[in-house]
Amino acid sequence: ELSGEKEAFRPLYDYLDAPKPRSIDKVTGEFLVTFTNKKINALLDSVCAPMAEEGLVTLEPGFLGSQTHYVPDTRSVGLVIDGLRAELLEEGEISEDAAMLAVLLERSSLLKTYFSKFEQSQIKARLKELEDGPAGQVIREVTACIDAMIATIAVVLVAH
């Protein structure tokens, strides 16, 4: 069952909770590469609406009445990055959420947006340590999924 703290991901969970497993290609295609964007918009609304209520993102209307855009609050992003920096660059345990966010930032080439070159190298070394440790299998699987989604998106965008 989906835990209460992850309820915002209900649209994705409901889609994945099918009798037959779906491939990364299928999920990526259904959520990111469609004419209606219905599934990804439902997921974004589900995740971002509570953040808007807390003032973490603001709503901006889309061009000519298209889908509303959620713009993150700069201060909130800074707080998340500061927390991530502290958790990844200091001694001690790294939470699963921090590790996954770091992997996402690294694989999407956004780590350089928030961290210096020195910090990037330290974070990459820390992720490598995690990958070689007990949590390594999960990190390797998540990294492989992220890579597969990025490759699928690239192929679909080039093909269209």
Image (cartoon, helix red, strand yellow):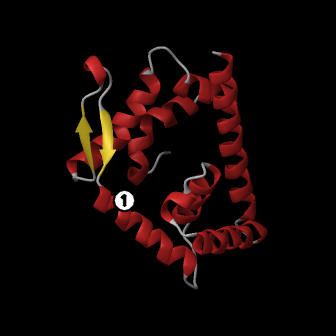
Q: Is residue 157 above or below residue 90?
A: above
Q: Residues within 10 Å of mark 1 (few under 14, many from 20)?
A: some
Within the image, what quadrant is residue 71 found in? top left
Residue 22 visible in rendering = no
Instruction: Point out the image quarter for the C terminus.
Output: top right
Residue at x 40%, y 64% (from the top left corner): 80
Between 70 and 160, the residue placed more toward the observer is 160
Residue at x 43%, y 66% (from the top left corner): 81
Identified by mark 1, the residue type is Val
| 71 lies left or right of 53 | right
Residue at x 45%, y 29% (from the top left corner): 40
Residue carrying label 1: 77
Within the image, what quadrant is residue 48 found in? top left
Q: Furthest-bottom residue in view?
A: 91
Secondary element at image label 1: helix
Q: Is residue 79 above or below residue 92?
A: above
Q: Is residue 64 above or below residue 111?
A: above
User: Percent from the top left, x then y, of residue 96?
Assistant: 56, 64
User: Percent from the top left, x then y, of residue 128?
Assistant: 73, 68
